[in-house]
Image (cartoon, rainbow, N blue to C red):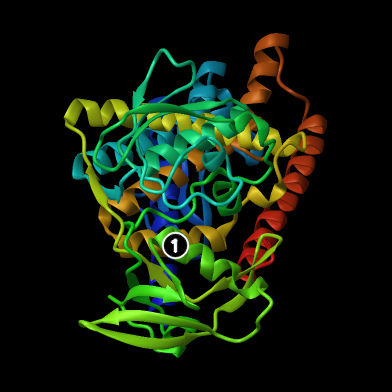
Amino acid sequence: MMDFLIRVFAFVLTLGILIVIHEYGHYRVAVACGVKVLRFSVGFGRVIWRRQPKPGGTEFVISALPLGGYVRMLDEREGPVAPNELALAFNRKSLWQRTAIVAAGPVANLLLAVLLYSAQHWIGVDELKARFGPPAAASLAERAGLHSGDWVHAYSYDGAQWQDVRSMTDLRWEVTQAVLRGQRLQLMVSDGEGHGQRVVTLELDTLGAKDIDAKLMLSIGLGAPYRGDAPVLGAVRPGGAGAKAGLREGDLVLSVDGAAVQDTDQLFNLIRGSVNRSSTGPLHWQVQREGRVVDVDVQPAAVMDGDKRVGRIEVILGKPPEMVTVQYGPWEGLSQAVSRTWDVSSLTLRMLGRMLIGQASLKNLSGPLTIADFAGQSVRLGLAYYLGFLAVVSVSLGVLNLLPLPVLDGGHLMYYLFEAVTGQPLSDAWLERLQRGGVAIMLMMTSLALYNDVARLLGLH
């Protein structure tokens, strides 16, 4: 119950912040351009809170459905306007002023993202060190000659210009970018102590992937984090196969069915392959626990990992993964924030474009349930993580609103582009047709996003 309440609170807080900032962008520029703003609303539907600081001024309201907001401006197209207020009407303003007012909402979201990323960089975040865990068999990492424990220091696309990799988050981000671009990625790696540097190449251009998900990362070799070589057990999940067998955190695995276990990689592969062996009985383990040898019979659960049937015991293998604190100074943090906002914006547009032409799966489209889930997770991790999550959603909202769909800000900007080129505004008849088409497209996108959310919750994606 508490987990559900945290998700709801984080979701409402996220939407509230992003909607207020977006609509404030419209509001602030409208006022600066001399437009009278009648209402500033967070949410749609029935008004549950209202405040009007001065008679005849802007009415600020919160409405019952918190899935958006709006700024209602004085406009002759929406009702009669008193002669003494005609100069304050939105439709009477110049083309550049109307354009600035409409663009101000998405721009406000992008500027907010820069501020949020900057704050996250200045606070600092604990992230996984960029060390490979055991690469899956036949993965790109294995074919490139990478081994469990290899430490990635830098990446390059051309072998000439190298950029530092500060954490596993950096590495995953660049891998994602390279997959979408269809490019190879060169990595400067060493062993865990920093010795024996060498260059390896991930042939990401051969993937042709449509889904950017955990399954793709596993096929690349970015699955489980590196947890050390010794086959020591970490946290044991209650109710899992390991807990039912009596395994405990801190157990050192000596052998499985009489075969000596040398490292975590070997143990990992033995567990995964256990459900496909000829014998159907449990595995006989010997573990060292508090200085004595203990015999344990373990029956791994059979689960589907993509299209493969593998064994799983719900136990963390190895020691806790090594973490690094990623933190930047004032100027570098701001510079990195601008760069990350641009990169996430470009990535969002590329993903939308790939989905439109069929090069990326529509499963990548997420809706409110996924946002609520990630919001709750980030809140539990701490302020810096939540700021990063909020920045990502803010970028997505800003980019989405710039799309040339009639019901979005980008659609209105397209109208103004038409007006700038032809010298006359779009006719009312065409405006009505385009609005109906835009509403239909948005309903389809919303329905698809919600379907994907439910499918993920049910384990169908």
Q: Position of residue 149 (x, y in %)?
A: 36, 47
Q: Position of residue 37 (x, y in %)?
A: 45, 40
Image point (59%, 47%), residue name: 219
Is 91 or 68 nearer to us in this picture? 68
Which SS class for mark 1? Answer: helix
Is 456 or 147 nearer to us in this picture? 147
Q: Amino acid at mark 1?
A: Phe
Question: Can residue 64 be seen from the camera position used here?
Answer: no
Q: Classify residue 307 as left or right of residue 402.
A: right
Q: Relative to 382, is 109 above or below?
A: above
Say which quarter of the image contains residue 34.
top left
Q: Position of residue 257 (x, y in %)?
A: 50, 78
Question: Can residue 223 be seen from the camera position used here?
Answer: yes
Image point (70%, 61%), residue name: 451
Image point (38%, 61%), residue name: 263
* Numbered-mark total: 1
Is 208 or 329 nearer to us in this picture? 208
Q: Position of residue 77 (x, y in %)?
A: 66, 35
Q: Which image quarter holds the N terminus? A: bottom left
Q: Classify residue 4 as left or right of residue 99.
A: left
Q: Which image quarter holds the C terminus? A: bottom right
Which residue does the numbered mark 1 point to in the structure image?
Answer: 11
Q: What is the crowding at mark 1: few (fewer than 14 residues within 10 Å), some, or many (at least 20)?
A: many
